[in-house]
Amino acid sequence: MALGWSTAVVLFGAAIRDGSIDPVPALAALLAAAGGMLAGRRPAPREPIEIGVDDSGCIALRRVAGTVDPNEQRLQCVFAAPWLITLKSGTMWVRIWPDSVPGNLFRRFWVYVRWNPGRQPADRTGATAPVPPG
């Protein structure tokens, strides 16, 4: 940020050096000032999210704070490797890196995603009694 502003001041000084304004250094000074302003801007705070496996075995996303609506969004796994898991819901992409989650959680989640056939909900046939046909 300081570099952008100092560059803008130097270029503006060069633009008005002879008493008349030279347009090229003046435009460069304006661009350097805009770059300094953008570099100093902080990104908007993002609300935290939780990602997990719901009761039906689907990968789900839930917003932690800032919303009253407790609805969960279903996520689809588009890439799973030991170094990165990428999930997608509509136009939102969520990337999970091993160093962004505590302890052995990444490995356990990767194993679930990797070995869940077709990345579909887990089979729950053993939890319910079969229904006779007819």
Image: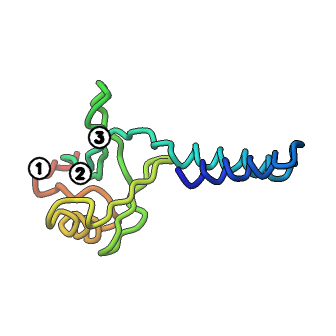
SS class, disc 2: strand
Determine which of the numbered discs, if any, sits on residue 128 in the image: 1
| Amino acid on which the number 3 mark rests in the picture | Arg
- Relative to 47, is 127 above or below? below
Number of numbered discs overlaid on the protein picture: 3
On the image, which quarter does residue 42 sit in?
top left
Q: Which is more foreground, mark 3 or mark 1?
A: 3
For the point 74% across and 48% down, the residue is: 13
- Toward the front, the furthest residue is 18
Dots 3, 1 in contact, CB < 8 A:
no
For the point 17% across and 55% down, the residue is: 124
N-terminal of the pair, mark 3 or mark 1, is: 3
Q: How far apart are marks 3 and 2 (CA)?
A: 9 Å
Q: Mark 3 points at which residue?
A: 62
Q: Position of residue 41 (x, y in %)?
A: 50, 42
- Toward the bottom, the furthest residue is 82
Answer with left or right where residue 100 lies relative to residue 73: left
Q: Mark 2 points at which residue?
A: 52
| Amino acid on which the number 1 mark rests in the picture | Thr
Dots 3, 2 in contact, CB < 8 A:
yes
Q: Which of 1 and 122 is in front in this view?
A: 1
N-terminal of the pair, mark 1 or mark 2, is: 2
Q: Where is residue 134 in the image (x, y as percent from the top left)?
A: 23, 45
